[in-house]
Each structure stands twice: as structure tokens, then as C-alpha cells.
């Protein structure tokens, strides 16, 4: 009787350990899938952002010693370099 009880308890412990492993593995796969979807969405949204367009301002007078001002938009605002 004692050996039958130990065999049953061993089988129950193995079943609990296997169920715990399967649960942890499925939870890990679910988290990895969610993380990959978030990264894919971030990558796609960064590809859909418009590229910064360089604006050009022409000098009114081409005087010696004066250079043409540079104007561009970096996506966060317009930058004017006089």
C-alpha cells in the first residue's frame, strides 16, 4: 500500500510539473508574439512617417562676403541658419 501511494504521488507530481511547464511555455510564446506585433507595428509606423523636406531660400542680393541662408525642416520644426 505504501509503494502504491508513493507511485501515485510521484505520478501526480510529474503531471503537475508538466502542466506548469506547458502553461509557462504557452505564456512565454504569447508574450513573444505580442512583443513581435508591437515591434512590427512600430517599424511600419516609422516607415509611414513623411521624410523631412529641405526648403531652400534664395538670397535677394548676391553680395560678396554674404552667403545664402540655409533653411530646412527636420520634422520637428523649421531651422533657419543665417
Image (cartoon, rainbow, N blue to C red):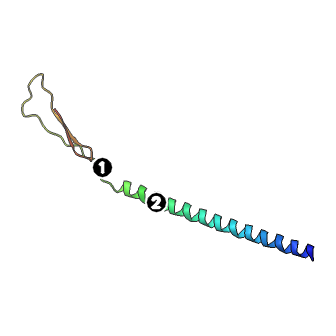
Q: CA distance from mark 2 to mark 1?
A: 22 Å
Image quarter (top left, top right, bottom left or bottom right) of the N terminus: bottom right
Q: Which residue of the protein is positioned furthest toward the left in this rendering?
A: 61
Please report whichever mark, 2 or 1, sits nearer to the chain's N-terminal start: 2
Looking at the image, residue 67 lies above or below residue 47: above
The foreground one among 9 and 55 is 9
Coordinates of residue 39 in the picture (x, y in percent):
46, 57
Image quarter (top left, top right, bottom left or bottom right) of the C terminus: top left
Q: Quadrant of residue 71?
A: top left
Under circle 1, the secondary element is loop
Coordinates of residue 63 in the picture (x, y in percent):
8, 25
Looking at the image, residue 59 lies above or below residue 26: above
Which disc, if any, is residue 66? none
| 38 horizontally vs 6: left or right | left
Residue at x-position 40% and y-position 58%: 44
Which residue is labeled 2 in the image? 38
Residue at x-position 27% and y-position 44%: 74
Q: Quadrant of residue 67?
A: top left
The foreground one among 9 and 39 is 9
| 52 horizontally vs 82: left or right | right
The foreground one among 79 and 27 is 27
Which residue is labeled 1 in the image? 51
Crowd class of label 1 (few under 14; some 14 to 19; many from 20; radius 10 Å): few
Under circle 2, the secondary element is helix
Q: Which residue of the protein is positioned furthest toward the front in this rendering?
A: 2
Q: Quadrant of residue 18?
A: bottom right
The foreground one among 33 and 71 is 33
Residue at x-position 34% and y-position 57%: 48
Looking at the image, residue 33 lies above or below residue 52: below
In this view, the mark in front (2 or 1): 2
Amino acid at each position: 500500500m505504501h509503494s502504491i501511494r508513493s507511485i501515485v504521488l510521484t505520478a501526480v507530481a510529474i503531471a503537475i510539473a508538466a502542466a506548469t511547464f506547458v502553461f509557462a511555455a504557452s505564456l512565454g510564446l504569447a508574450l513573444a508574439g505580442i512583443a513581435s506585433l508591437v515591434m512590427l507595428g512600430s517599424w511600419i509606423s516609422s516607415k509611414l512617417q513623411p521624410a523631412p523636406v529641405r526648403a531652400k531660400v534664395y538670397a535677394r542680393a548676391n553680395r560678396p562676403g554674404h552667403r545664402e541662408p540655409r533653411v530646412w525642416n527636420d520634422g520637428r520644426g523649421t531651422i533657419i541658419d543665417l
